[in-house]
Image: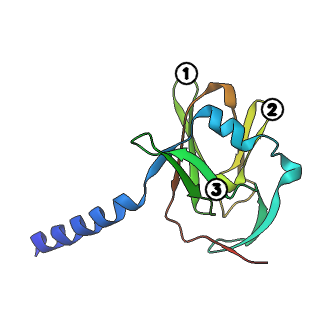
Amino acid sequence: MKRNTFIILFIIGVWILPSCKTYLIPLESFEHQFAGIDSTSLKEVRIEGAAYDTYLANPINKIDCIDKQGNAFQLDNSPAIEIRFTYGEKNKRTIFYFDRVIKQDTLIIGGQSRFIPSLIKAIPFNSVSKIEVQNGGKNFKYVEN
């Protein structure tokens, strides 16, 4: 019985893990993609699958990134997309929802929770060493207004 359980869990793990591909966003590309986006250019969106259903999001529809082989890739933005910043001398990591991120002067400001909208954090852009983006696998979807 234990062997069958192990085999089933292994198959499920092999099936789920590849669906969480991680892509890189070069720092210059991030700056280019967020150029001109500030709190006045955010759009109101509605989603299903979270505690609250409307919020202000950045207007980026396609995310320019690079896969692990170095190939250019465009990832469709959705409320499930997460962005992870590695920054600072100690390589701290912070995760935001991609559609809740803006770059304001030398800061990256983002929302960290769908359930607590006021949970917002700012990190210094000049100390960022790595930017990764992936579909977090959460069941959040945009809904037409």
Cβ atoms at labels 1 and 3 below 8 Å apart: no
Q: Foreground residue, 19 or 92?
A: 19
- x and y percentages locating residue 67 in the rendered image: 45, 45
Which element type, helix, strand or loop, lies under badge 3?
A: strand
- x and y percentages locating residue 125 in the rendered image: 68, 30
Q: Foreground residue, 117 or 66?
A: 66
The N terminus appears in which quarter of the rendering?
bottom left
Q: Please tell me how crowded label 2 is: few (under 14), some (14-19), or many (20+) other residues with Cα within 10 Å.
A: few
Q: CA distance from mark 2 to mark 1?
A: 21 Å
Mark 2 or 1, closer to the camera: 2
Badge number at residue 105? 2
Q: Which residue is mark 3?
A: 62
Badge number at residue 89? 1
Q: Residue at x 51, y 29 (%)?
A: 91
Label 2 amino acid? Asp
Label 3 amino acid? Lys
Q: Residue furthest top?
A: 89
Q: Residue 122: in sight, yes or no?
A: no
The C terminus appears in which quarter of the rendering?
bottom right
Looking at the image, is mark 2 or mark 1 earlier in the sequence?
A: 1
- x and y percentages locating residue 128 in the rendered image: 60, 30
- x and y percentages locating residue 141 in the rendered image: 62, 72
Looking at the image, is mark 3 or mark 2 earlier in the sequence?
A: 3
Among the 4 quarters of the image, the one containing residue 94:
top right
Which element type, helix, strand or loop, lies under badge 1?
A: loop
Q: CA distance from mark 3 to mark 2?
A: 22 Å
- Tell me: residue 132, above or below residue 140: above
Which element type, helix, strand or loop, lies under badge 2?
A: loop
Label 1 amino acid? Glu
- Tell me: residue 142, above or below residue 72: below
